Amino acid sequence: MTIIDGKQISATLKESIREQVAGFPEKYGRVPHLVVVRVGEDPASVVYVRNKAKACEACGIENTTIVLPEETAEEALLQKVRELNADDTVDGILVQLPLPKHISEAKVIEAIAREKDVDGFHPGNVAGLWQKTPHMSPCTPAGIMKLLEATGVDPKGKRAVVIGRSNIVGLPVAKMLLDANATVTICHTRTVDMPSVTREADILVVAAGRAKMVTADMVKDGAVVIDVGMDRDPETGKLCGDVDFDAVAPKCSAITPVPGGVGPMTIACLMENTVQCFLEKMRVELNA
Ligand code: GUN
C-alpha cells in the first residue's frame, strides 16, 4: 500500500514552476501577479488564502491578498473584481469561496474576466472543459489527475467512482476521469446502497464533505482512494478526511492522506494556472 505524498509531488511541481518563472523577467520584463480576495473571516478560508500567498512566494509569483469585511456589499465586491479585471498588472484573480450568504457566488464568478480566472470556475472555462475546447482547468480536479499520474495510475479502462457532484470538485473530476478513458459513476446523497457502487471502484474519489463517511466495507481490495475531504473528526476534533483512513488504507493499493494529499496539489495547480494566464497575456500582447 502506498500513501500518496501530495506534499512531495506538489513541492516538485512548484519547484519546476519557480525555475520557469525565474526566466520571466528577462523574457517578459516582469513575473506573474496573482490577486486573492477574501471576504470575511471564515477560519478555513483564512488558512487557505495564507497558503496560496506562501505558494506564490515559493514560486516567485507576485501576490496581493485583499481582505474585505464580512459585511461588504455584493456590488462593492463586483466593483473590486471589475477594477482587477481592468488592471493590466494583474494576471490572475481568485475570490475565495464560500462567500457570505448575502453575496451571490455565481454573480462574482461570472464577473471575473475569463482570461484571469485561475480557478477555472467561469462559465466559459466550465464549458471549455465539457466541450474539450481551450480552457483553464479547475485546480482541485487537475491536482487529483496529477496525483494519479505521479502514482503511476492510468485511469484508462478502469472503473472510477466519484462521491459528490459539486461544481468545484465532483462534476469536473468526473469529466476529467472520463476524458482519461475511465468508466465513471457519480454517487451522491440520494444514491441508494452506495457501498454496492463504491465497491466496484478501481479508483474512488471522495468529495462528500462528511468526516470518515467512507468505511472499509465500501472499498474494493487494491483500490486507489483519493480523499478530497477536509473535515474535523467529531470525536477528537482533529483534521481528517471523508475517508476513515486507518480502516481503509490497508485495503488500498494507494491512498491520499488528509492533510498532505489533495490539498497541496490544489495550490500547486493554482500556481500553474497563474503562469498559464500570464503566458497567454504575454502571447496576446506580443501579437498585438
Ligand atoms: N474554496 C475552497 N476551495 C476553493 C478553490 O479552489 N477556489 C476558491 N476560490 N475558493 C475555494
Image (cartoon, grey):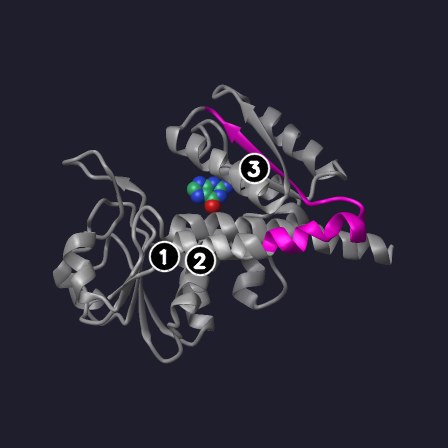
Q: Position of residue 102 (x, y in %)?
A: 46, 27
Identify the residue position indicated by label 1 in the image: 5
Label count reads 3
Q: Picture quarter containing residue 203?
A: bottom left
Q: Are marks 3 and 1 in contact (CB under 8 Å)?
A: no
Q: In which quarter of the image is residue 186?
A: bottom left
Q: Is residue 125 visible?
A: no
The vertical placement of 244 against 158, above or below, is above
Q: Mark 3 points at which residue?
A: 108
Rendered location of residue 44, percent (x, y): 38, 33
Q: Is mark 1 on a helix, strand or loop?
A: loop
Q: Which residue type carries mark 2?
A: Ile
Report which residue position mark 2 lands on. 9
Residue 262 seen in the figure: yes
Mark 3 surroundings within 10 Å by alpha-carbon count, few (fewer than 14), some (14 through 19), many (20 or more): some
Tell me whether circle 2 and circle 1 mark residues in contact (CB < 8 Å).
Answer: yes
Q: Give the range drawn in magenta.
A: 17-40
Q: Nearer the viewer, residue 207 or 250?
A: 250
**Which residue is painted at 79% across and 53% down in the image?**
27
Are the residues at dot 3 and dot 2 in contact (C-beta closer than 8 Å)? no
State how far apart marks 3 and 2 are (Cα).
32 Å
Tag on residue 117?
none
Secondary structure, mark 3, is helix
Give the mark nearest the N terminus, 3 or 1: 1
Q: Residue at x 74, y 37 (%)?
A: 86
Q: What element carries label 2?
A: helix
Which comes sooner in the sequence, label 3 or label 2? 2
Q: In front of the other: label 3 or label 2?
A: 2
Mark 2 and mark 1: Cα distance apart in space = 6 Å
